[in-house]
Amino acid sequence: MNISEAARRSGLSSKTIRYYEEIGLIETARRSDNGYRQYEAKEVAQLQFLARAREVGFDIEECRQLLHLQHDSGRQSRHARTLVLEKSAQLQARIESLQAMQEVLQDMASRCHGDEGPECAILDDLAGGKEARE
């Protein structure tokens, strides 16, 4: 199948597939006589694997590690589990950071009158308080 069909079946864009080839994440697709990339079912399965891994937050290098594990018949499942637990911890830290940012924003919004007047607690906070303006 051509790259458009492989993209449709995998959930990745053609551009992403080409990029994955360029950086060596996946092997370069074989070419037909007319020069178009051609993909077999096993290659589409690998693209689907990558799409799912990216969807749950794995970066390119982590995907590279996961692909290596997938193709390693002597692999140990603990390596995949370790990668997943590390990613989960990173995401949890990011969630906590985002929640803290949201709380700050909500606090700032609650202290701003939001009226026609020029006084704005949000702008004061971002400027470092009243002392920063003087």
Image: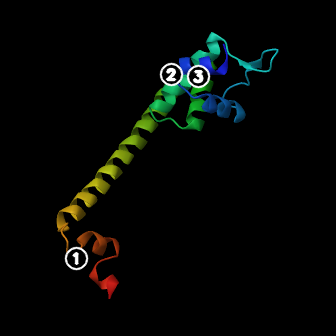
Distance from label 1 to label 3 (Cα)?
A: 52 Å
Earlier in the chain: of badge 2 and badge 1, it is 2
Earlier in the chain: of badge 1 and badge 3, it is 3
In the figure, is residue 62 to the left or right of 1? left
Say if residue 48 shows up in the picture.
Answer: yes
List the residue tagged with mark 3. 7
Extreme residue in the right direction: 33
Say which residue appears at 69% left-offset and 30% top-offset. 21
List the residue tagged with mark 2. 77
- CB under 8 Å between discs 2 and 3: no
Amino acid residing under circle 1: Glu
SS for callout 3: helix
Extreme residue in the bottom direction: 134
In the figure, is residue 48 to the left or right of 102? right
Mark 2 or mark 3, whichever is nearer to me: 3
- The image quadrant where one finds the C terminus is bottom left
Say which residue appears at 20% left-offset and 75% top-offset. 117
Q: Return the x and y of residue 24 as percentages of the image width and height.
A: 70, 32
Extreme residue in the top direction: 41
In the figure, is residue 76 to the left or right of 23? left
Distance from label 2 to label 1 (Cα)?
A: 59 Å
Q: In front: 56, or 16?
A: 16
- CB under 8 Å between discs 2 and 1: no
SS for callout 2: helix
Image quarter of residue 115? bottom left
Q: Return the x and y of residue 75 as percentages of the image width and height.
A: 58, 20
Q: Return the x and y of residue 96 as percentages of the image width and height.
A: 32, 48
Say which residue appears at 61% left-offset and 32% top-offset. 16
Q: In front: 73, or 99?
A: 99
